[in-house]
Image (cartoon, grey):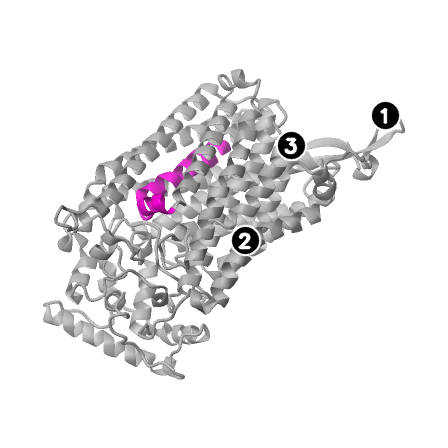
Amino acid sequence: MRNVLNTGAAPVELDEFQYDNKIVRDFAIASVVFGLIGMLVGLLAAFQLAFPQLNFDLPFTTFGRIRPLHTNAVIFAFVGNGFFAAMYYSAPRVLKAPMWSPLLSKFHFWGWQLIILGAAITLPMGITTSKEYAELEWPFDIAIAVVWVAALVNLVMTMLNRRVEHIYAAVWFYVASFVAVAMLHVVNSVALPVSFFKSYSWYAGVQDALVQWWYGHNAVAFFLTTPYLGMMYYFLPKAANRPIYSYRLSIVHFWALIFLYIWAGPHHLLYNALPDWAQTLGTVFSIMLLAPSWGGMINGLFTLRGAWDKVREDIVLKFMVVAITAYGMATFEGPMLSLKNVNAISHFTDWTVAHVHVGALGWNGFLLFGILYWLLPRIYGRSLYSNKLANFHFWIGTLGILFYAVPMYWAGWIQSAMWKEFTQEGLLKYPNFLETVTQLAPLYFLRGVGGTLYIIGFIVMIYNLLMTALNGKLIATETAKAPALSAITHNDPQEHWHRRIFERRPVFLTIMALVAVAIGGLIELVPTFMVDSNVPTIASVQPYTPLELQGRDIYVREGCYVCHSQMVRPFRDEIERYGEYSKAGEFVYDRPFQWGSKRTGPDLHRIGGKYPDSWHYNHMDDPASMSPGSIMPKYPWLLEDELDTTTTAAKIRAMQTLGVPYDEGFDQVANKDLQKQAEKITESLKQSGIKTKSDKEIIALIAYLQRLGTDIKAGQGVAVK
């Protein structure tokens, strides 16, 4: 429908169109529902570290399996759906155009929820790639790529059909998020399928670690940061009834942030077996990130100039101010943690857990809460049900963050101090790793209390929003009017260069955003793959035997990497505790790498040969029987379940395709080799008084554990070309 706008000059026809609020509501509901589930799973995981019996001796509820479920649910279901709800509300309104394709919007919604449901089913089953924030197996990776690109196409086409000359800053951040995550996801997820729910990473060892943390760090950047900055740029000015503080600052903030962020991934691998030049690049660009990150924080907080009196009364602004402050704290701490002298203290400790949750609970959680309190009453045509309940949510949520973060910071400092402390005689003061774990139980309990407080506030918000909706009526569509783009386009010689070059050209904006995020990745990844000296080979390092390969897959399935690292850093205390520091060439057959990011338990890279087979058997059956006071779950099913050897040949062939030098035709005799090694371990257990069959999963896991870190001592392995 067209109307006429009379401006005193030539009449301008107005297009009439509708904004779709149903898709906004649907994503908001999904965010809240899956968010509650994800947080409850996280709460269970938190208390499992204080009370190990909460693992329930079941495979589906062990910490190693539910921790990835928690991270995926909170990141992709809670934060992700929240982003999509905000985008489907804000983007059409700043572009003055409905989303280009309602069908693609619905495809995006249902496709994303089905992926989340798939994750909720497969991750507790142990179906995982073990790559942090990318644990889902290859069928889901394909589905994610398809759904993600569909949403990107819908957004870009909406930009092309806009009714405004210039594209507002919020949409820049949305576009950059979509193109960057698409690139990161596709590159990191390249794998060779073995079966419908099993694949091996295309990359190995050092290369796999670099690609994963290039992805992992930037998943935080472009899924948890840039989309929510876009949301801040739209909803904060709306809530404060003030324009954004500085247009020019938003330009610098945007381009500097997306260009610099992509380089910072290697700071997750400092003092690891990564080339020094890559570690240095990661550190340098992480420090540089402080400037654009705080530029965004300043732009947000200064938007409230002249409106701070409203913050005392407006619950939406309260949440947003704390969120932006948490963003500033987290983006200051991140660069500090990338300094080698600080990282030597923080890495593998609970300090990192505290850092991540200040961002997740404070920045993402509180910003989304503020937006939901602003948004839901508007699409339901009534005021918020209870401001008192919203204020209660704010204060109990803030207390929850403090009770979560402070104990975790303290735990991280205790861990590092105890790991590194020596006696006057030059010996480790705490040689038994378990001594450092038992000290942390009260702090893990307090962390759980903090999580409980935060979830109570979340439940109160759900009730408040539900009552708001029940007492109102969904405004399914909102009618708006605006002149067509062709009717308002004009050339202004004084126009800002950014508006002329980028904001009038949405496709060019999208392409240049992709270029900006691709440069850093190319410069870091390509040399690591192309220059052999980045990963010096070691002649004694041999491929895994078939039994060891099966055992490694069990290790991955059970999520052992969640609590154990496989990376001895070149520190005096680690060499004293674990043995020779890890070398890049030792991991050339590791697909995927298992370096880990947190040590709830000790490093395992030199565990091979340290204990007899019987110790590992009893330890997996009942960890406390070997390590009194252990908080590790029991794994009785490993002693009972038979190893599936029907997959052995396919796994060997996959490894051969990926370049592992097994003899030609080895896949045909691999199970004979497997059985021979299994019988040796079974006989060893028998001599220790343990009777078991050679076809049990525990035998394969023992074979893998006994292999770890032994190649540089003795180059024993299977026949190679």
* Side of 327 relative to 433 (left or right): right
Residue located at (14% from left, 55% from top): 626
Residue located at (56% from left, 38% from top): 85
Give the x, y percent position of residue 429.
15, 47
Residue located at (57% from left, 20% from top): 305
Residue located at (35% from left, 51% from top): 597
Please, which residue is most extreme toward the right here? 10
Q: CA distance from mark 2 to mark 3?
A: 26 Å
N-term-proximal mark, 1 vs 3:
1
Please, which residue is most extreme toward the bottom here? 665
* Side of 178 relative to 675 (left or right): right
Q: CA distance from mark 2 to mark 1?
A: 51 Å
Q: Pick the residue in front: 201 or 256.
A: 256
Tell me the kind of residue under disc 3. Tyr
Q: Pick the residue in front: 268 or 571.
A: 571
Determine which residue is flagged by label 2: 520
Tell me the kind of residue under disc 2. Gly
Determine which residue is flagged by label 3: 247
Judged by its main secondary structure, the magenta piece is helix
Q: What segment carries the magenta color?
A: 340-369
What secondary structure is found at the residue carrying circle 1?
loop
Give the x, y percent position of residue 394.
43, 25
For discs 1 and 3, the disc positioned in front in the rendered view: 3
The local crowd at label 2, few if under 14, some if 14 to 19, many if 20 or more residues have their Cα within 10 Å, is many
Residue 466 lies in the magenta-colored region: no
What secondary structure is found at the residue carrying circle 3?
helix
Determine which residue is flagged by label 1: 6
The local crowd at label 1, few if under 14, some if 14 to 19, many if 20 or more residues have their Cα within 10 Å, is few
Asked whether residue 550 appears in the rendered view, the answer is yes
Q: Pick the residue in front: 137 or 416.
A: 416
Residue 352 lies in the magenta-colored region: yes
